[in-house]
Amino acid sequence: MEITKDIKYIGVDDADLDLFESQYIVPNGMAYNSYVIMDEKIAVMDTADHRKGKEWLSNLQNALGGRKPNYLVAQHMEPDHAGEIVNLISLYPDIQIVTSAIAAKMLPQFFDGIDFASRTKVVKEGDELALGSHTLKFIAAPMVHWPEVIVTYDTKDKVLFSADAFGKFGTLATDEDWACEARRYYFNICGKYGTQVQALLKKAAALDIQTICPLHGPILKENLSYYLGLYDTWSKYGVETEGVFVAYASIHGGTAEAAQKLAEILKAKGAPKVAISDLSRDDMAEAIEDAFRYGKLIVAAPTYDAGIFPPMHDFLHHLQIKAYQKRKVGIIENGSWAPTAGKLMAAMLEQMKEVEIVQPVVTIKSRMKEANIAELEALADAILK
């Protein structure tokens, strides 16, 4: 695939991958993106996961057409992008690895017994690398989403090689909406690091960017303001879609019934959008995505072993570690003899930044009763206010 006259795509699709990072369901697999810049000197932009190493090396050699690369720009040391570094230098022993100081320290952690010091060129913010007609400018992007990350700007073709930023789940061969899987990817991979993403966006705003080449997902060439705008909203923990997300976990169906009734009430009261998820069955990463997407959240769960029913506890723990914030949250608890889930869910939520718990907290005793419906109505009014 040709990105520009001199920049070629040499990445690979991994349609057989079922779990990304051994935790995120990827029904449409994953793309490991890599690029090569053909100039007087040749730069390879990242490698690929070892799972697809032979295919990646074949793509590289076809693009090189018999020439030898001078540089490997290693923007990110995660194995899905750096997995083929040793195989690359075994084929091209004179190649120089261009990377950040932190990445240079990481290299021996991933690949034992290799002399990296003699073949590594360390770059920092603002450094440039001349290839001929192309000049690469390096920009530090720490914690987007590892500390060693750099991104690279090609000043000639105005291409930003954005590392994991602007990536998404799914192969390049998959024809699907960008935002859905990019959102799920962002909040689960980068969600904790909004401040750092904002810093990168400010640096990007000073550049004339015509194309974004991420390490996952499609190359972005048109309507870049759309993608940049979403990243701005996401990294500020802003509300992308006005509405309410109802997340419930239910043992015997009683809590599910109450959550579904509340969803009906919210719709009847004019909520612009109501999304609902069964945390015991639905994809956790998608539930996290929806929690960040909408401005308001309802959590509903029973007491279990004097604590929170585990699927809900897991959900709230994920929200904590992904820096969930700036939201209104309502609570429904259930219990047959000593309900404590509401208090415990509130305690977890109160640890999150700028999370407002709305009243009333609705308590169900085993099964929803007529009296509970009025309480659900009051909770709906409070969350929509």
Image: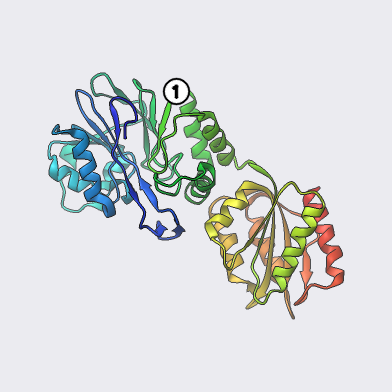
Query: Is residue 1 or residue 318 the one in the foreground?
Result: 1
Q: Amino acid at mark 1?
A: Leu
89 in relation to 370, above or below: above
* Residue 370 picture quarter: bottom right
Q: Residue at x 38, y 39 (%)?
A: 163
14 in relation to 368, above or below: above
Q: Residue furthest bottom?
A: 337
323 in relation to 220, above or below: below
x, y percent for residue 139 = 38, 30
Q: Residue at x 77, y 72 (%)?
A: 364
Which element is circle 1 on?
loop
x, y percent for residue 355 = 68, 51
The image quadrant where one finds the N terminus is: top left
Q: Residue at x 18, y 41 (%)?
A: 117
Residue 88 is left or right of residue 193, and the answer is left
x, y percent for residue 254 = 72, 74
Q: Determine crowd level at label 1: few under 14, some 14-19, many 20+ residues with C-alpha closer than 10 A.
A: few
Query: Is residue 17 or residue 330 the one in the foreground?
Result: 17
Q: Can residue 335 be seen at all in this image of the molecule?
A: yes
Q: Which residue is mark 1?
A: 207
x, y percent for residue 308 = 63, 70
325 in relation to 366, above or below: above
Query: Is residue 133 or residue 77 the one in the foreground?
Result: 133
Q: Can residue 320 be seen at all in this image of the molecule?
A: no
Residue 9 is left or right of residue 329, and the answer is left
